[in-house]
Amino acid sequence: MTVEESTQPTVWDGHNDLVWELRDQAGYDLDKLDVGRHCPSVRTDLPRLRAGGVGAQFWSVFVPSSLAEPAAVVATLEQIDGVRRLVDRYPNDLALATTADEATGAMSAGRIASLLGAEGGHSIGSSLGVLRGLYALGVRYLTLTHNDNTLWADSATDIPAVGGLSPFGVEVVREMNRIGMIVDLSHVHERTMRAALAATRAPVMFSHSSARALCDVPRNVPDDVLAAIRGNGGVCMVTFVPEFVTPGRQAWRDRRERHRATLTPDEREGDWRAGFLATDPAPVCTIDHVVRHVEHVREVAGVDHVGIGGDYDGADSMPDGLADVSGYPRLFAALRERGWSAVELAKLAHGNMTRVLRAVEDAAS
């Protein structure tokens, strides 16, 4: 064990899309994609989670927002079942958790607390009954949108339609408060962020978002919203996705996709990316870019309101040094070198998320 690993606090990560990869690559066949050992086709497996010091993980039960709502509800239930099957498969390593106490208990016992987060309001099918049903199945946060608007909330990457939240959207937020589900504001339009903060009576979270002041893309959080999180008691969990932490990376990806659109089907099957990179290399993304976002969130929102939401297995690439879930110790080593204390690192790693979930539980009626 390295010095960095021996002094690293236990990590509670806000967002990981492994379960979608289990569905997409293997149809949830855990023999075909056995994450109990090193799996090169994904960025997440149990050996690397252990090497990364991960003690709690919000597993995203993501389904595409392009699905019609009834199909999205069904697919979300299948994703929830996928997480439960994963936990059942590896009982010595994983433990399903639905409360802050269960999460901390699992971590203390040396198991990885496994919590569920639904990524996108389309997963509730515009039904408060379905919302309550997902809670009963263990879902503890709902991201209000994904890449597309819902009928009641505007997405950061769609054309605004309801001005943030509709009256039903406000009902969704208040019902989440009542039952004890965290309102997740990653992916939503900035008007939706502000409307949700005005409507909620419990802390919110950004499960995987970074600072817009450093990387000006719609998926990131403006400084006024980061400042509002301080008063709300919530947490912004900084993501590692290069397009969200490195200026110019999203524009480069857009250029790449425009180039791809000009190719024939046969050319798209070939190694066209190498030729594109030779003439238009991607802006470099490193741990230092992530560190800047973590420190900016600490500066604006406060050290009690920053966390980590890597978004592993939900992005095409990751920063140099953070290629997979074993990389967290390198991030903490970089922060330690910049003067972060052990107390501050523990808050970033898991303490702030633990506090937020407990506060949401306490606010439930």
Image (cartoon, rainbow, N blue to C red):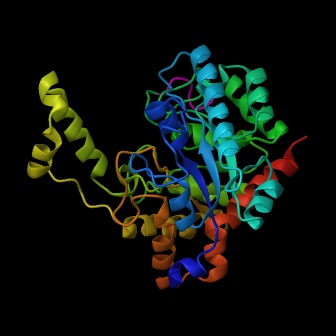
Residue 115 % position (x, y): 69, 47
Residue 138 % position (x, y): 76, 38
Q: Is residue 216 left or right of residue 337?
A: left
Whether residue 136 is situated above or below residue 333 in the rendered picture: above
Q: Is residue 281 left or right of residue 193?
A: left
- How many numbered marks are there? 0
Residue 161 magenta-drawn? yes
For the C terminus, the quadrant is top right
Q: Nearer the viewer, residue 248 or 41?
A: 41
Q: Is residue 139 left or right of residue 283?
A: right
- Locate residue 80: give its quadrant: top right
Whether residue 346 is situated above or below residue 337 in the rendered picture: above
Residue extending furthest toward the right:
365
Q: Nearer the viewer, residue 309 or 232?
A: 309
Residue 118 % position (x, y): 63, 36
Residue for point 68% across, 45% down: 87
Q: Which residues are magenta?
A: 160-166
Residue for point 20% across, 40% down: 255
Residue 110 magenta-drawn? no
Q: Is residue 302 visible?
A: no
Whether residue 294 is situated above or below residue 256 in the rendered picture: below
Residue extending furthest toward the front:
31
- Locate residue 50: give its quadrant: bottom right
Q: Is residue 69 visible?
A: yes
Residue 210 % position (x, y): 48, 55
Q: Main secondary structure of the magenta part?
A: loop
